[in-house]
Amino acid sequence: MLKLSTPFKLAFLELKHGWKHFGVFVTCLILGVAIMATVNTFGSVVQNALNHEAQGLLGGNIEVRIRGVAAQDKEVQFLKKYGKVSYVATMRAMAHSGEEHTLVELKAIDKNYPLIGDLEFNENINKSDVFKENGIAVDRILLSQINAKLGDTIQLGEEVYTIKATLKKEPDRAVQIFNFGPRVMLSHESIKASKLVNTFSLVEHRYRILTKPEITVNEVFEETVKQELQSNFPNTSWRVNSGTDGNRMLKRFLNQLLSFLNLSGLSTFLIAGIGIASAVRSYLSRKVETIAVLKVQGASKKLIAKTYIMVLTLLSLFAGVVGVCIAQAIISSLMPILKGILPVLEGGSAMHFPSLLLAVWYGLLVAYLFSVPALLSALEICPALLFRSKNNVLYLHNNKAVRLSVFIFSVLLFLTLYVTAVDKLFTIGAICLITLAFCLFYLCVTAVKAWAKRIHVKKSWLKLAVGNLYRPGATTGTVVFAIGISLMVLIALTLTESNFQQRIQKVVEERAPSLFMIDIQPHQKQNLEALLKEYSPHVMMYPMVRGRVSYVNGVPANEVTVDPDIDWVMRGDRGISYSNKAPENAIISHGKWWNDTQASNNPLLSVDQRILSGMNLKLGDTITLTILGKDITAKIANARQIDYSTFQINFAMMLSQGVIDKMPHTSVATIHMENATNETEFEIVKRIAKEFPGVTTIRTKEIVSLVQTLMNHIATALSLTVGLSLFAGLLVLASSLSSTIDQRRYDVAVLKVYGARKSDIIKSCTAEWMLLALITSIISAVIGTFSAYLINSQLRAQEFDLMPEVTLTTILLCCIIVWCVGFIGNRKLFNLRPSNILRNE
């Protein structure tokens, strides 16, 4: 009992009388735990909500989806063998009310809708009363957009509808990354009169099935349904999805966002770890005499180790509890905002206990990982130190015990990251990236110290400043790691975002069309093209049908090996066009475009060049497309380099003329107007709405605004974590200065004895801090800029702007911050009297 209680008593005394020395240690841990707990809790809460509401969001136990053409009666009857069926069709269209025109998301429903959950309106009205006699229900925001009220009418296509209710809850309202317009809900019977739904209109036909009680819905059942549909109706392109994997696109987007936030949070945690290491070393340096006294009195290394491990554990648990409390408070305060963005969170809990425990576990691992070197080094303190100078500094050892302990805790940390990660591959890449960053900065620190040793200066104060960069116990490594990594991430993030925004703006001004029109019927093409050319000669119009890839060189599509980068080509229907003349925006990278004579012999195909590389194809190979139940085998004649970010008309696959010309199809068109004003664009929209009510017109500026808003939100979230990492870096800097304050006091006393003036000491310290800041910011700028370049290359950006103003601003801010922190942390040294130090020697 005595052996167990002695370490506890000693630890209690250490905390009772020395708690004020752990300020940086506790603050760094709280910061790291709070970030990890916030990110993980948010991800878990959203994921749980999506999983819990999966079938509700899907609208049934299973959903069968086809594009363009609705299912035939015999196909619907086949689906009914699985259970009760509800048919929902969604599309985008233009809503017209007087002089107001806006893009809306149309949703046509049947009497069985919804199969799961309840459709609720803000008004006290029955569903059957809303949708009879051309009645519609709309999102409230639509009323303000078109300046309308309940009872008013709006035109959709060629029919007029009455607004009878506003939507309060739509149980299957999927959470979308982009919403192109407010919801308008109506019945299948009434949408027919609008003539918006035609063959190959851009309509999603969804058949939700509430399965029979004896059927178990899982991935096996989903695959069974898909195979049975394909075998019985091979000419229809079916996509089957069960509630086990609903909202796949949103989940993938959230997983990627959370992965980046986790990476940024982990970087902050590791930077805070450097502060933890510095704080522990500083504290144990003050305890050198205490540990020596304990050894003189017979204390073993084991007892001392237990004492300080208990101190660190108690402090880590305290910091962890405070950190998760802060994280929970942040999540709870953000829930009202998040519920507005993600309706699935309504009624859900804002707490996820495993995520909070995981953050505390991260805190313990990081605390032990960065504290162990100093702690094990302290165990080697010799009692003979009691007879030497009182100005003792704890020098770190690099023995076998230290290396083994660091290795064990590093493995535990990385294993925890890997096991709990959603994206394992990303996690491995992140670990490698972090390791590479630390190695690069380590090499830079080594190079700086080597350079400082070789440089020769005449000024004594400058010589002292340079010497402080490489002397034993120098803060060079700590500052470069802590501040440098934060600045590197900040510069990389800033340059990436700025280049992305600049590129989007450039695309809008130079290449993107002003307006994009879809669902153009064959009899409307000539008149619409004439209308558009009144405003600009830069008009593109191409026919479009929908088809799917069924064979590649005779091999069934589901057996073809495809790179993940272009697997979208093989999923479901794709838009396909035809022409014997190369599009104006075509950049042909392989082969040549065909002429009329070549096109009359055999069907020819032009593809995105990524299809060639992603499927390991070459010119002359064949791809079989299934369009309206007809298989068309075409030979690849050329490949194009396509940049889909320009918002221009780009088809991944284009056939030669004479193959599908006579099939039912619609057309798409764009118009590019240089220096077009909003007034001109709205004028064209109004004319199209009046003369071609079934054509949907999309303003490119609105789409770009959605993209920019999304990117701004993501950048804000990432910038917040980077800002916190910078704050952690400042804590590390303050801790590092604090850990060397005793040594610096001794140095200043000796210098003053030898005649150094206050101004010399101030100049020396200022020069040291400026050199540190300059070296750190230059290293960060070079690595951060290169990282931003690599990221932009992955995003297929053709240009990269170095933006030197960003780099220069970063260097200037870094110098100011480091100088301010250094001056505040060392201000007592400037007025130090040597007698106070020498009297005790």
Image (cartoon, grey):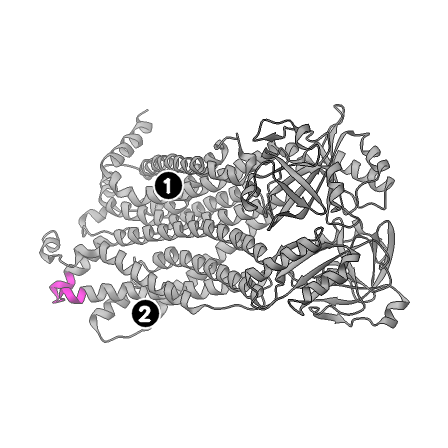
Q: Which amino acid lies under the numbered mark 2 shown in the image of this protein?
A: Lys
Q: Earlier in the sequence, mark 2 or mark 1?
A: 1
Q: Is residue 590 visible?
A: yes
Q: Residues within 10 Å of mark 2 (few under 14, many from 20)?
A: some
| Magenta-span inclusion, residue 755 | yes
Which residue is identified by label 1? 30
Q: What's the magenta region?
A: 750-761
Q: Which amino acid lies under the numbered mark 1 shown in the image of this protein?
A: Ile
Q: Residue at x 17, y 57 (%)?
A: 829
Q: Position of residue 679 (x, y in %)?
A: 56, 60
114 in relation to 791, above or below: above
Which residue is identified by label 2? 453
Q: Position of residue 306 (x, y in %)?
A: 34, 36
Quadrant position of residue 610 = bottom right
Quadrant position of residue 808 = bottom left
Q: Nearer the viewer, residue 685 or 361?
A: 685
Q: Which quarter of the image is occupied by the N terminus?
A: top left
Q: Are marks 2 and 1 in contact (CB under 8 Å)?
A: no
Quadrant position of residue 230 = top right
Q: Residues within 10 Å of mark 1 (few under 14, many from 20)?
A: many
